[in-house]
Amino acid sequence: MADLTALPSVIFDLDGTLLDSVPDIQAAVNRMLAEEGLAPLSRSTVQGFVGNGLPVLVARVMKECGIDESRHAELAARVSADYSAHAAVETVVFPGVIEALETLRNKGHRLGICTNKPNGATNAVLRSLDLLDRFDAIIAGDSLPQKKPAPEPLLAARDALGTKAIFVGDSEVDAATAQAAGMAFVLYTEGYLRVPKDEISFAAEFFHFDELPAIIQDLSAGR
């Protein structure tokens, strides 16, 4: 049972929220395409495919490149294995993330992650960037049968943390997930949002992570 009297936990999306991971995702996709004798895709194209998990991303790549959809399982497995092995080559943490996480923890908030990235790649990239131990719960894209925007992964992260929670993300997928879970959503505006922000619902927005602790404090106090 969640402790509703405690400070809310703060749950984060990963790609496009804490990390700029598109360069490594793009590289894994383009290595697969090169093996197929196909031209590489641009960052902007691959970034537009991010957000619903790797299998969906690969399906979108295949459609873009005219690859027979019957090969989806094979190609998704290849890209997944390649990406998991190279998940932190060019991936970087967004400015101010480390400081914001430390501030929130010092104020007593528990921290979690809810991502559609597979568990292996999630743990690999977090460990490589010295972020893994900063989180009390991680729900990845293969932790449950459902993926975001279904509410179950976010609710599982909240339940693992044991308190009410606030969700921080960067995309329309994250906004829809928070809405479905009945959770306050904070939008990071410098991520991978594919629609105008006035088309989604959020409790607050921020441009740089040094703004986030004050936003969480206000939401925690009901302001």
Image (cartoon, grey):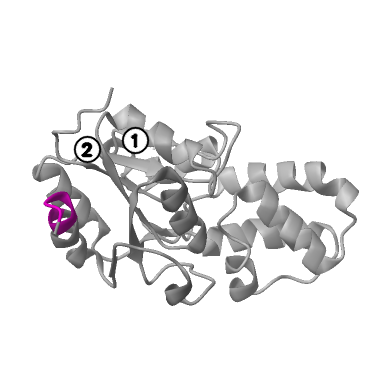
Could you give the CA–CA distance between mark 1 and mark 2, rounded to whole angstroms? 10 Å
The N terminus sits in image quarter: top left
Residue marked by disc 2:
110
Instruction: Establish if 217 lies above or below 38.
Output: above
Residue marked by disc 1:
158
Q: Nearer the viewer, mark 1 or mark 2?
A: 1
Residue 208: percent from left, percent from top: 26, 70
Residue 197: percent from left, percent from top: 43, 74
Under mark 2, the amino acid is Arg
Under mark 1, the amino acid is Arg
Residue 47 part of the magenta-drawn span: no
Instruction: Establish if 112 lies above or below 104.
Output: above
Residue 123: percent from left, percent from top: 44, 38
Asked whether 178 or 214 is in front, the reply is 178
Asked whether 27 or 218 is in front, the reply is 218
Dot 1: few (<14), some (14–19), or many (≥20) neighbours within 10 Å?
Answer: many
Residue 219 part of the magenta-drawn span: yes
- Is residue 87 visible in this depiction of the protein? yes
Please tell me whether the stretch drawn in magenta is mainly helix, strand or loop: helix
Stretch in magenta: 217-222
Number of marks:
2
Asked whether 92 or 51 is in front, the reply is 51
Residue at disc 1, secondary structure = helix
**Sequence-first disc among 1 and 2:** 2
Asked whether 65 or 205 is in front, the reply is 205
Q: Residue at x 15, y 43 (%)?
A: 105
- Is residue 14 visible in this depiction of the protein? no
Q: Residue at x 40, y 58 (%)?
A: 19
Whether pointer 1 and pointer 2 mark residues with C-beta atoms closer than 8 Å, the reply is no
Q: Is residue 147 left or right of residue 170?
A: right
Residue at disc 2, secondary structure = loop
